[in-house]
Image (cartoon, grey):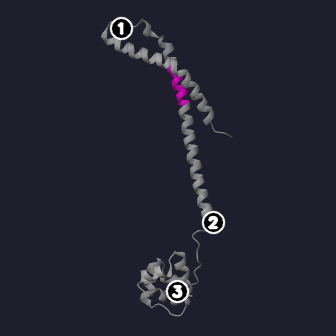
Amino acid sequence: MLNENIRAIRKSKGLSQEELAVKLNVVRQTISKWEQGLSVPDADMLISISEAFETPVSTLLGETVIETKADDIRVISEKLEVINLQLARGKATRQKAIHCFFISLCAVIAAVFAALIVLNSSYLGWDYSQPDTAVTGVVFHAFEWLFVRTAPLALIGAVAGVCLTRKKG
């Protein structure tokens, strides 16, 4: 039983007999004899083996240890499933954020158009002879001129974005 447990735990930890021998400061043949049941480690060596395996001594002396396969397909598929779920959630969150951005952009464009209509394009009657109001008038005029020419394209793009990012199903 001890010999089978040493072999099973060593293999499950991915260690060769040589690597375990180096950890325990013994020769590889000693490990081979333990695993074949030809000899038995003493009490101090059992403690060293349990430390090397990070396993209690009782496990080494106890019932048969089932060798685990690190590359078990079921474990790998479960891990991939978790990763896929995390990626899907991230994608849904990003899509929702982009959708909200496009809706907000539409609302901002509509609000600025409404403000410009209410203000009644006062820049045409602005008094540019006074230095204090000339700069403000030029800035306002430039903003309004640029906004009126680019906002329709931005609005069309935002509406298209809202349609493309809406939740399907």
Residue 42 x, y percent position in the rendering: 45, 91
Q: Who's the residue at 57% across and 35% down the image?
A: 99
Q: Is 135 drawn above or below residue 49 in the view shown?
A: above
The amino acid on which the numbered mark 1 sits, given as a three-letter code, is Tyr
* Residue at the disc numbered 2: 73
Q: Who's the residue at 57% across and 40% down the image?
A: 95
- 105 is within the stretch colored magenta: yes
**C-alpha span from label 1 to label 3:** 97 Å
* Residue at the disc numbered 3: 61
Marks 2 and 3, the one that precedes in the sequence:
3
Residue 154 x, y percent position in the rendering: 54, 25
Q: Nearer the viewer, mark 2 or mark 3?
A: 2
Circles 2 and 3 in contact, beta carbons < 8 Å:
no
Marks 1 and 3, the one that precedes in the sequence:
3
Q: Which of marks 1 and 3 is in front?
A: 1
Of 131 and 18, nearer the camera is 18
Q: Main secondary structure of the magenta part?
A: helix
Q: Is 90 drawn above or below residue 38 in the view shown?
A: above
**C-alpha span from label 2 to label 3:** 30 Å
**C-alpha span from label 1 to label 2:** 77 Å
The answer to whether residue 70 is left or right of residue 28 is right
The N terminus is located in which quarter? bottom right
Q: What element carries label 1?
A: loop
The residue stretch that appears in magenta: 103-112
Q: Is 110 drawn above or below residue 9 in the view shown?
A: above
Q: What element carries label 3?
A: helix
Residue 72 x, y percent position in the rendering: 61, 68
- 58 is within the stretch colored magenta: no
Q: What element carries label 2?
A: helix
